Image (cartoon, rainbow, N blue to C red):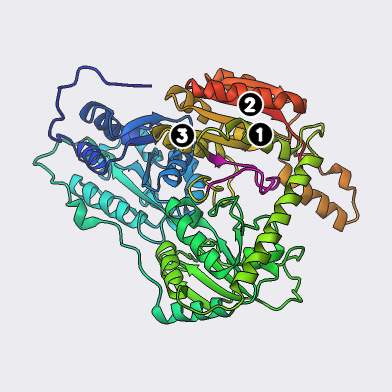
Amino acid sequence: MNERPAGLPGTRQPAAYGSDVVADLLHALDVPYLPMNPGSSFRGLHDSVVNHGGNTAPQLLLCLHEEIAVALAHGWAKATGRLGVAAVHDLVGLMHASMAVYDAWCDRTPLLLLGGSGPADPAQRRPVDWIHSATTQAQLVRDYVVWDAEPATPAAFAADVVRARQRALSAPRGPAYVSLDAGAQERRLDAPVPLPDLDRHAPAPPFAPDPESLERAAAALAAARRPVVVAGRIALDPAATAPLAALVELLGAAYHDDRNWSALPTAHPQNCTGDRTVVEEADVVLAVDVVDLAALLRPRGHGRSSPSERPAPFVVDLSHGDLGLRSWSNASGTPLGRDVQLLGDPLLGLRLLRDALADRAMPGTARRRRGVVAHAAAVRRGQREAVAARWSDKPISPARLVGETWAAVRDLDPLLCLRNTRTWPEGLWQLPGAGAYLGHSGGGGVGYGPGALVGGALAARDRGQLGVGIIGDGDLLMASGALWTAAHYRVPALVVVNDNSSFYNDEPHQARVARERGRPEANSWIGMRIADPAVDIAALARSYGCWAAGPVEHPDELGPALRDGVRAAGEGAVAVVHAKVAPR
């Protein structure tokens, strides 16, 4: 959708108002999109983007909720590796957006959030400004942004936006919030405001691990009998696949993706993802950019306080470590012993570690590699057999939903923006390595999916790919308005709705509590089921302007519906396939 303003001069004019400075700066920073839900606190910036900047670089993307706007920027940033930008209205808009901001912080995603505040001068405030502004507006999100500012002059606008970008893109990455004083946005400039030299305000470069620690890590890995390499958030960077594969092959190690990431090709012969025993039986674990190491190393089947009888592995942690740890949130704060901490940029550290191991004698590596390859092949056979065993299930099994979706898109160049988490059948979807799947929300906030899917699909569209997502019914219904934004701006996507008619994640929790208390487990569905009436998600999608099929209930009808959806997406549509699926 080209929303081009009319009546503007043929060339961009010098900035005349405070908010024009911000529009010019976003243009200089090559920001292509500004997702937002409109609000009077940034009406000056809105006008500047449209009537000063021509609604080009950035282009406004209207979203039906602030949470969707931030999640869209979140998904786009993960797909591109660039700074995502969104605008949210003061106080009430920021309150709406706050969960999405927290998701981005947990996910270490670089975002610039622009808001409005004040005016600082009480004499300039309209009645609504008193209830929609605060003395320290950023306090709402200060505990889960990497930096915030509330500049009150146009020159401060420029300085603080540049600083926010610099900090958001420097390790550890995350969202930054800048609230632009409404009075200063709308005030005519007395003199030109020069933009900062962006080359002199670049994000911090990658930093390398300590050489002594690198040597200790290399020695431990070279002497390991059962080394395992696990990769996490580095899976967003396509550049990670080659050095990661080289290191895995050099060590003859088993490989396992961290939860909800995919960094090594599914078909790599040493990829054992889906078999946690390789992690549980390892004597040395190299964790590359794993945000929650404690969850990775917790033995399967053990509760929060259950001790493990196996000896603890030697742990090498290659990451930004605790640099992003905050006292307010417990995210990533589980105490965990690390034998070697390679504090540094994960990609740079991976290359240095590979180089440190290249000339070391590692007896038995070839034999170990053969064993790992045989084990990985057996794991993949078992995974395929498990999928085949449930292929004809009614209702449709989650594994068949994934298998049929993969079959429908495998000959394209898909970007997997979302997938089911608990019920994902490992080894079925052939991911080519890092950058092919965008991972989870980070903060576990339901409602992230729709906006993030659209943001990922927008990035995919611009580089000739198709954005694909498998999304739960509860997640979609929390922010279904994202479908309108995708349809309005002609962002093709294949959206596959895994409808188990429940907020099912919590049904096992209710069953467990009831069981432990000697109460009926059969009542775990109450307060969970999205039924009576059932939501016609396909009809809802059509109302937003999407192509839609469903609800599909028979397993043999799923493949044809998905193939029709792929054809519709190929013609530019947002294609929604609504499937009724078993909970597990």
Q: Residues within 10 Å of mark 2 (few under 14, many from 20)?
A: many
The residue tagged 3 is 465
Front residue of 455/467: it is: 467
Whole-Å distance between the Cαs marked 3 and 2?
Answer: 17 Å
Tell me if label 2 and label 1 are in contact, CB under 8 Å.
no
**Other residues around mark 1 within 10 Å, as few (<14) / some (14–19) / many (≥20):** many
Q: Is residue 502 left or right of residue 569?
A: right
Tags 3 and 2 touching, CB below 8 Å: no
102 inside magenta stretch: no
> Along the horizontal axis of the image, is 378 left or right of 362?
right
Q: Which residue is mark 1?
A: 473
**Which residue: 23% across, 56% down?**
201
Q: Quadrant of the N terminus?
A: top left
Indicate the amino acid at tag 3.
Gln
Say whether residue 176 is left or right of residue 358: left
Is residue 424 shown above or below 142? above
Between 247 and 292, the residue placed more toward the observer is 247
Residue identifier under label 2 = 562
Residue 213 position in % (x across, y down): 45, 79
Label 3 vs label 1: CA separation?
A: 25 Å
Query: Which amino acid does the dot numbered 1 rest on?
Result: Asp
Give the quarter of the figure containing the C terminus.
Answer: top right
As helix, strand or loop, the secondary structure at mark 1 comes to helix
Nearer mark to the viewer, of 2 and 1: 2
Quote the CA–CA distance across marks 2 and 1: 17 Å
Q: Quadrant of residue 174?
A: bottom left
Q: Earlier in the sequence, mark 3 or mark 2?
A: 3
